[in-house]
Amino acid sequence: MYISNIIFSQKAIDEEILDLINILIHFLHHQGVSIMLRNFSFQRNNEIVVQIKIPEQNSLANITEYKWSKKLLEVGVDIQVEILGKDIETNEVCICSKPSFYIFLGTPNIPLVCGDCQNSVPLYRIPYTDESDNNYYNICCWNKENLAWSEIEFYSFEEPFAHKQLCDISSSHNKTALELRYIIEKVSQTKCYYYLEELRYVKNLKIAKDKKCPCCGGIWYQKEKILNLYDFKCDNCQILSTLANLDE
C-alpha cells in the first residue's frame, strides 16, 4: 500500500470548494480507492493537500474521471497526485490472478484478504457490493464500526457489550458481517469466509479443542493450522478463527 498526496490548487479556496473536496475524498473511500481512517489535510498557499493511503501505486490514476473531480475541474480547481512512498506498516496487496477464496474480516486497512497469499485485496477488484449506489459503502461502514468496537473493547479492558459485538456470532455486528460475506461471495463468484474474533480469547488448549462451531455446533478445531494461521474452520458456515497463545 502507498501514501499519497492529492493536491487541489486554485486562486481562491472557498467553502464550496472545500465541500467538494470533502465529498470527493469520501467518494474515493467508498469506491475502495482510499483506505480512509483519519486523513491528514492542510492548506499551503492556494493549495489544499489531502494525504491518503491507497492500495496500489496506480489507484488514483483515474481520479479526474470521477464526477466529483469533474465538478472541481469545472470551477477551476487543478488536481494533482503525488505518491510519497510505500506504507511500511501494512501488508502487501494481493497479486494472485484469481484467488481460490476470500476472507472477510475487520481491520484498520482493507477488510478483504486473499485466501491463497493472505495479502489484502483492493475492494475495486470485485464488483460493487452496494449495487444501489455502485460502491462499497456497506463494507466501508461495517469496517469503521468494527474499528470503533475494537477501540472501545481495548481501551476499556473488554467492555462487555463491545466484546459481545466482536466475538458473539449472534451479535448485530456479526450478523451484518455474515450478510456481507454472502454478498462478497455472490458478486465475486468466489468462496468467501468470515473471520470471527471469538477464539482469540480462548487461552486453554483443552477448552479450545472442545469448542464447537458457534453457528452449526459442528467440530471445527483443526489439528494443523490452516495456511499456518487459522486454528478453526467451518466449511458449512464459512467462518474461520484463530487462537491466542495457549496454555496446555
Image (spheres, rainbow, N blue to C red):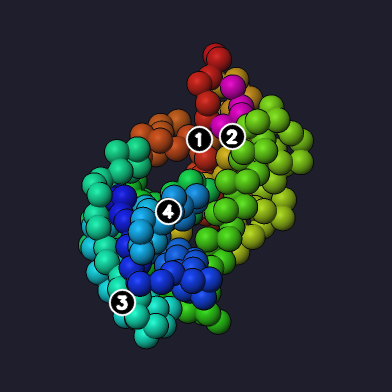
Main secondary-structure element of the magenta-colored stretch: helix
User: Is 78 positioned to the left or the right of 222 in the image?
Assistant: left
Mark with earlier residue (3, 2):
3
Q: Establish if 109 lies above or below 49.
A: above
As measured in the structure, the alpha-carbon distance from the residue carrying label 3 to the one carrying label 4 is 21 Å
Foreground residue, 79 or 128? 79
Name the residue type under label 1.
Thr
Q: Which residue is mark 1?
A: 242
Mark 1–mark 2 contact, CB under 8 Å?
yes
Q: Which residue is mark 3?
A: 64
As measured in the structure, the alpha-carbon distance from the residue carrying label 1 to the one carrying label 2 is 6 Å
Q: Residues within 10 Å of mark 2 (few under 14, many from 20)?
A: some
Name the residue type under label 2.
Leu
- Residue at 34 percent of width and 80 percent of height: 76
Mark with earlier residue (1, 4):
4
As measured in the structure, the alpha-carbon distance from the residue carrying label 2 to the one carrying label 4 is 42 Å
Q: Which residues are magenta?
A: 199-203
Depth-wise, is mark 1 or mark 4 nearer the camera?
4
The x and y percentages for residue 37 are 49, 51
Q: Which residue is mark 4?
A: 42
Depth-wise, is mark 2 or mark 4 nearer the camera?
4
- Residue at 66 percent of width and 57 percent of height: 175
Foreground residue, 24 or 9? 9
Mark 1–mark 4 contact, CB under 8 Å?
no
Q: Which residue is mark 2?
A: 199
